[in-house]
DNA sequence: TAAAATTCTTGGAGCGCTCCAAAAAATGGT
DNA sequence: ACCATTTTTTGGAGCGCTCCAAGAATTTTA
């Protein structure tokens, strides 16, 4: 690859002049400019290499998005929530004219990814891993962490998941439901884990603050109605697990209401209900979480704990871009009641 | 920001040793290593700056995705098609451990964006703009252009849009439809444009090969049934235009079948039908284009010209990553018949 | 026509790093 | 205690660029 210097030599001018031809052509006498351009063409020089400029100028003009947990970026793009989050981030990037880098990294390469990412700041998906935070801090880049409060010195944005979870349960108990099942998230690879009442392992501390908090909200909401979460079957599946709905229906047939951790999971339930001819909400009520656009278009339209996902992504990007004093933002949630919830079925068995 | 040299000075060792401490610690005597690490900590040195490494090594380890036309990345993320495409790309990026840079650029800054993008290759959304191609070629980066054949020297991937369009029309004429409307894409900002039969401006050459080809397929399919596209109202709206459905229903009330250019547009139609209490497919049939996941979950489930969007994105990324001899790939489409199409309503008026 | 003003062009400095051949230090064998 | 090995550390070279102060060339003015 030819360089500025090569072109300069060929055209009989200095490096600096060639640079000017490409960056501030008005500074170069037209005749000379043409000579330089000809030389560049002849050498197949395609303009100054951004690497060089970068080293000198020091700005990447990009922000990095690092998926939560150990997820790959394709997994983020698969989930309705993830897509909307990225959309929100991209909105702010559009406004700022910034590139959005979806940074990859498996469990082992994650730290290297952060170390090497060509970005001016980071948005970290929710994560229990303090190591990631430290990695980013090392680089002294502005960053924000999602759904995981990491203390007053660190930018964070989270929703009030507990309140949302409580509202969902209240809505259902208010309708008269007494038999619940919870479709929760498994944060490690593997098949669904089923926690039946009375069994030893309770999954109440999943290690992801996001999950913990919602589960805790469910617990509290149930307690308000004199129900114990210990009597509720909890199924944990990895996001996108296609069998999730089947497992819930098979293992918790007596449940009249199903609480989930995301719209995606709720959609899975709805899909499985269609497959089995189970009537929603006649036979079971289903509640989603997140309030993504998809939740409004399911059959039936879904009752869900809505948050402003797009706004959250956008705010995250703005916080990174603006790089002001760290703050911890807690966003409100709102239960959106649609048609996937109703009074429980008559107790026939 | 301290540099390797600064740390070296503070620890009484050379630049090279400090570099080794961070990149190949096993090469450095533990005791010395510790001294260097202490110095780094004291100075607040967060590891070698990626800019320097980049200049030396020359690999960005990222591929760039440039939205089609003059769209912003948020617009891509808004459309079902765009999201699935990005998902496909991200799948290949995950496999390759590459970063996916969603490159921004308004009409004016687009060239600069390409010039400066910190990527090893490009995926260009479909575009009529030869200038973009030239910009990328200048940088001598591998790239692929989507839905726009640019000749044998240039990587391209497109679907067989014409066949898809023809299949859609055949399906509908086969059901007995004689009255059509087409919801097409407006590629410039602005309100919907309505082309009624008999009016002067026919929109058959939109300038985007993708649109042209589909429109041409519609034309051909109609001709096969002795219908002329000139008798068909064509409404052009920008993607995501919320009023699109309303305009179509208002301006083409006699249409029994509505052809669209994307699932997104078809979803808009379906939404508007719900709003107006128009029965689909009883009153009108609607056909989508793309076969995104969303199309299977609409109410009613949508008949659509399906392509493998994810596969396309993935292939595009692979072509860029592998950087082999240029090829032009044409992907097949398949009409997926679901419940949004049926025989036309009885001719009551 | 010379001096002054203006327009162009130049090349040094510096951005921060990694590689590598060679020098220095440590280790082992006799 | 000395030489041969092996392990560590070093610093030059080079990656490609842009900025900028200063020098060179040209144009204007008197």
Image (tube, coloured by chain):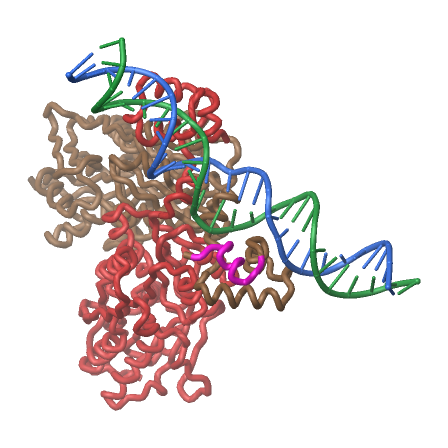
Chain colours: A red, B brown, C green, D blue
Which percent across, then down, holds residue A2?
Answer: 49, 29
Residue depicted at x 34% and y 77%: A182
Q: Say which quarter of the image contains residue B129.
A: top left
Task: Tell me if A112 is positioned left or right of A311 in this view.
Answer: right
Residue depicted at x 16% and y 36%: B235
Which percent across, then down, holds residue A81?
Answer: 31, 61
Q: Is residue B163 visible?
A: yes
In this view of the protein, which residue sits in the foreground, B224 or A249? A249
* Quadrant where the image shows the N terminus of chain B: bottom left
Does residue B137 show up magenta in the picture?
no
**Count of numbered tags:** 0
Residue depicted at x 28% and y 26%: A26
Which percent across, then down, holds residue A172?
Answer: 22, 78
Does residue B6 show up magenta in the picture?
yes
Residue depicted at x 43% and y 77%: A194
Q: Which residues are magenta?
A: B2-13
Q: Is residue A288 visible?
A: no
Query: B115 above or below A334?
Result: above
Which percent across, then down, holds residue B188?
Answer: 19, 35
Q: Residue furthest left?
A: B349
Q: Say which quarter of the image contains residue A86.
A: bottom left
In this view of the protein, which residue sits in the foreground, B1 or B235? B1
* Quadrant where the image shows the C terminus of chain B: top left
Q: What is the magenta segment's predominant secondary structure?
A: helix
Query: A227 above or below D12?
Result: below
Q: Residue furthest bottom?
A: A226
Q: Say which quarter of the image contains residue A197.
A: bottom left
Task: Tell me if A164 is positioned left or right of C26 in this view.
Answer: left
Task: Tell me if B100 is positioned left or right of B235 in this view.
Answer: right
């Amino acid at each position: 690859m030819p360089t500025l210097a090569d072109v300069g030599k060929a055209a009989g001018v200095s490096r600096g002049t060639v640079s000017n031809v490409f960056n501030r052509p008005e500074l170069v006498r037209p005749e000379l400019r043409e000579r330089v351009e000809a030389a560049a063409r002849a050498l197949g020089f395609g303009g100054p290499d951004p690497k060089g400029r970068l080293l000198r100028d020091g700005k990447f003009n990009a922000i990095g998005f690092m998926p939560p947990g150990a997820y790959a970026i394709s997994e983020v793009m698969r989930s309705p929530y993830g897509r909307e989050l990225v959309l929100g981030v991209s909105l702010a990037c559009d406004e700022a004219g910034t590139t959005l880098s979806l940074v990859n990294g498996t469990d082992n390469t994650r730290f290297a990814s952060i170390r090497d990412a060509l970005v001016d700041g980071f948005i970290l998906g929710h994560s229990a891993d303090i190591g990631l935070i430290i990695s980013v801090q090392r680089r002294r880049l502005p960053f924000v962490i999602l759904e995981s409060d990491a203390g007053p010195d660190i930018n964070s944005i989270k929703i009030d998941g507990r309140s949302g979870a409580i509202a969902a349960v209240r809505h259902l108990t208010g309708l008269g439901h007494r038999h619940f099942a919870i479709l929760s998230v498994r944060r490690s690879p593997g098949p669904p884990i089923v926690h039946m009442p009375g069994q030893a392992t309770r999954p109440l501390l999943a290690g992801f603050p996001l999950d913990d908090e919602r589960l805790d909200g469910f617990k509290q909401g149930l307690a308000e109605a004199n129900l114990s979460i210990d009597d509720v079957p909890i199924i944990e599946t990895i996001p996108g697990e296609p069998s999730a709905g089947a497992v819930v229906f098979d293992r918790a047939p007596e449940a009249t209401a199903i609480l989930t951790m995301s719209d995606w999971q709720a959609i899975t339930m709805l899909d499985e209900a269609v497959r089995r001819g189970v009537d929603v909400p006649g036979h079971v009520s289903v509640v989603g979480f997140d309030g993504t656009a998809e939740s409004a278009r399911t059959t039936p339209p879904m009752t869900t704990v809505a948050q402003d996902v797009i706004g959250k992504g956008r705010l995250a990007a703005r916080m990174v871009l603006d790089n002001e004093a760290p703050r911890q933002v807690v966003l409100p949630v709102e239960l959106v009641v649609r048609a996937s919830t109703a009074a429980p079925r008559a107790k026939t068995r």
